[in-house]
Amino acid sequence: SSSGTTAVVVPTTTTTTTLDTPAPVPFTRNRSSSLSGSGGRGGGSSRVSLSDVLKGNALWKNRMFWTHAFYASVADARFRNISEHWHNETRLFHELPTEGRDEIVHEEGRIVFEELKSFAQLMLRAGVSAVRCRNFLVQLGAQCDLSDSECDTLGNLVDIWCEMNEATTTTTTT
């Protein structure tokens, strides 16, 4: 039982955050494991891959979690992107000129597509299967009125990312 410094490596960035922990390092396994730990003061620090710790979490298999997070993310992106452009506009949508309505509809479609693309990567990194991920994208894409071609593109991206991940995994294990 020693206190020390734990370095947490976040998978989406290359930076390492250092946290002071008053308790013993919580993730310790033997040296052959992906998680490792070393002693307290003067004994070095522990590096824990956050993605490895979180991958097995049952939350990632919960479709309601992903759906809620997706719609919250779309609402946030919509507020940032559309509201920024139309913040002085006081008319209702149907009162806007046709080109203004078309611009908003186009931007909404772009936001939905980009958010689904981002969520596909998050889901795959969290260990969600390609089949579940693809089904999620197609169903939400249809609910959000994406075209069949856009849904197909998202499905193809999942396939490409899975192939890239398999190639990377094969390369690092051989």
Image (cartoon, rainbow, N blue to C red):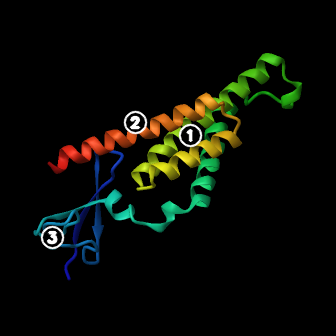
- Decide: is 158 above or below 35: above
Residue 163, given in percent of the width and then of the height, sits at: 35, 40
Residue 67 image point, x, y percent: 62, 53
- Residue identified by numbered label 1: 115
Residue of label 3: 38
> Which mark is first along the chain, 3 or 1?
3
Query: What residue lies at 56% left-to-right and 33% top-to-bottom?
Result: 152
Question: How far apart are the two marked residues, 1 and 3, measured between alpha carbons?
Answer: 39 Å
Circle 3 SS class: loop
Question: Observer-nearest residue: 167 or 112?
Answer: 167
Q: Is residue 74 left or right of residue 8?
A: right
**C-alpha distance separating marks 3 and 2:** 38 Å
What type is the residue that disc 3 sits on? Answer: Ser
Residue drawn at point x = 15 percent, y = 72 percent = 30
- Residue 66, position in %: x, y? 57, 55
Q: Nearer the viewer, mark 1 or mark 3?
A: 1
Q: Residue furthest bottom?
A: 1
Which residue lies under the disc numbered 2? 160
Q: Residue furthest front?
A: 131
Callout 1 crowding tier (Cα within 10 Å): few <14, some 14–19, many ≥20:
some
Pointer 3: residues within 10 angstroms few (<14), some, or many (20+)? many
